[in-house]
Image (cartoon, coloured by chain):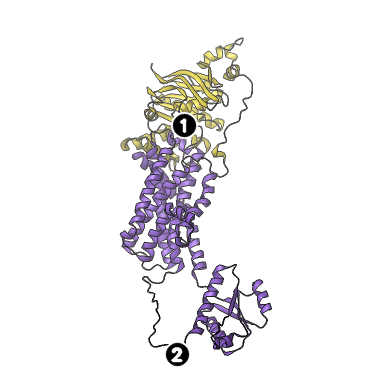
Amino acid sequence: MSNAIEVKNIVKKFGDFTAVNGINFEVKDGEIFGLLGPNGAGKSTLIRMMVTLLPPTSGTAIINGFDVVKKADDVRRSIGVIPQAMTSDLELTVYENLLIFAKLYGVPRDTRSRLIAELLAAVELTQWADKPVKNLSGGMRRRVEIARGLVHEPRVFFLDEPTTGLDPVSRTAVWGMLRKIKSQRDLTVLITTHYMDEADKLCDRIAIVDHGKLVALDSPEALKASIPGRAPETVTLDDVFVHYTGRDLRDALQEPSAADSPFVLRR
Amino acid sequence: MHRTWAIVEREMRRFSKSPMMIVMSMIFPLMQLIVLGYAFGGNVKHLKLAIVDQDHGVPAVKIRELATAVSSGARTLDLLDYSDSGQAMGDLRNGVVNGVLTIPPDFSRRLLTNNDPRVALISDNTDTFVSASMAATVGAFIGHLNAPETPVRVSGAAGLDVVEVYPYVPYIQYLLPGSITMSIFMMVMIGGGIIFIDDKARGLHEGYLVTPITKLELVAGFNISGTIKAVLAGAAITIIGSIIAGVPSPLDPMRFFRMMLVISITAFALISLMFLLMVRVTDPLMPRMMFGLLNTVLYFPSGAVYPQQGFPGWMHVIAVVDPFTYSVHAFKSLLLKNTGFEAIAGDVAYLLVFSVIAMTAATLLFKRTL
């Protein structure tokens, strides 16, 4: 089995601060790979480098055989991305959101409608296709984003905290849909999350990142078994997380987000 | 290129769902046109002139008669008789009257003996429009006092005949070119700049940046969609404003065609300028702050409300580079003079060159990554 993702000694510095510090790992074709870590550990920076939103300071990542530094456009064509923030257009309908992104990815006209219809069915939004996204619930909006990220049939799908802020029912629904979509397509999934149960149920392998470094990487079962002095069946992924990242709160200042401005038009 | 059209399609779909945007972009220029047009456009009337006649001779009575003629005819003046010059000056300082015309005691005698007869107009010069208007009116009827009783049949003095090439242009028509440019600018700022930064702040651009779209395709998409929105606003104000201002034959096909050409190029120039200014901005407050600043810096030096010949040197420099200047000049040529293309060719050329430079710079400065 070949690798869909190869991260090679990747580093990202913001001034004197090193957000990602020489991380290496591979994700095999068809895997669901989880990226866990405390707030500020470098997960989002790492994923943003893999999806070409941030240039690495050094090192690189090979996605679907394309180097993110040298072949960024080829990487973009072959991946689907659900960023942490909701990036669907609230004014447009569900269908229009998918249509615009199908056009941005250059999906041929004759396959566009079929693909959109299939994806809407997969995320169970067919009956809401003509509704503006602003009228949908948070869980439904996330499902729109999942469908949108897959509208050009990517081979690797990146999801940055896709279920954050959703209620348990919506989260379970999103997991189910991801599993279903994954079973129907030749798809590799890389997902970041704060929900350990989500990672446990969904992921084939999990990487734990802390202070910009990879501190653990294995299957959920193997990670549980790695905790010393405990029977694996009594260990949860929360225990694994705390074991590898410690119990200290990661208080840190961050750049204020423009999205927090009171002047942004809320629509 | 298909990605550019996808951006345009998205923007236009959003625009069609926000009809208030086009209304908002038109309200301000229309209100400005109506309020400023009627406030500044009329002749100054009913200026209160105190007359202090200390002479009471026949020439003084004649001055009084000439003033009364102006008062009852053009109604520029309202006359108030004072016997006490101190009282008149007090009222002038207190704003009760706008000027005091004093006819001194020896005025008639000096007039009859050709010994430098003079009357005095003391005016409240804190309002230059009022004082200049009053000086011109009083100067005119004092001039009549000097005219010979029997005019000579053939004058030997050099004279001037003024011939106006175009029909009378009321001030509201003079303002209309600036209002059209302003409506384009308003749409560029509201439908382009503010939404662009708000979308960026809400993370919508992140969605674009993970697609294979290039910098040029993205900037071109935003520019084309912004231009279409601004052209709609400019065309609407051209029609509505022409009707309000009483422009003759506002829908003359050839003029309307040329107007649409200038509106389109102006919209493209202003949206390119706006993207150049906003390309690295992330703070949603910034376009709102820049809105007022740009409005002042671009609109007033353009000659939209006052002739540029009256500007100081530094303001001429702004006017020369200001795209509003060329847009307003072209609209004035078309709306007030109904000229052909040759009269606006220079304006069109400048706006095109300006657009290309601004869009190229915006594309180079656009960051393809976060």
Q: Are marks 1 and 2 in contact (CB under 8 Å)?
A: no
Q: Residue A191 versus residue B140: which sits nearer the camera?
A: B140
Q: Residue at x 36, y 59 (%)?
A: B259
Q: Residue furthest top?
A: A229
Q: Residue at x 54, y 39 (%)?
A: A259
- Number of marks: 2
Q: Position of residue B148 (x, y in %)?
A: 47, 87
Q: Residue B138 versus residue A215: which sits nearer the camera?
A: B138
For residue A66, what is the image quadrant?
top left
Kind of element beneath mark 1: strand
Tell me, yes or no, if residue A178 can be seen here.
no
In this figure, which residue is indicated by the disc labeled 1?
Answer: A82
Q: Position of residue B45 (x, y in %)?
A: 54, 75
Chain letter, disc 1 residue = A
Q: Colour of chain B?
A: purple
Label 1 crowd bin: few (<14), some (14–19), many (20+), radius 10 Å: many
Q: How far is the residue under mark 1 from the one under mark 2?
A: 94 Å
Kind of element beneath mark 2: loop
Label 2 crowd bin: few (<14), some (14–19), many (20+), radius 10 Å: few
What type is the residue that disc 2 sits on? Answer: Thr
Tell me, yes or no, if residue B177 can be seen here.
yes
Q: Position of residue B107 (x, y in %)?
A: 59, 85
In this figure, which residue is indicated by the disc labeled 2?
Answer: B150
What type is the residue that disc 1 sits on? Answer: Ile
- Chain depicted in yellow: A
For residue B159, what is the image quadrant?
bottom left
Q: Residue B310 versus residue B338: which sits nearer the camera?
A: B310
Question: Is residue B311 shown left or right of residue A262?
Answer: left
For residue A119, what is the image quadrant?
top left
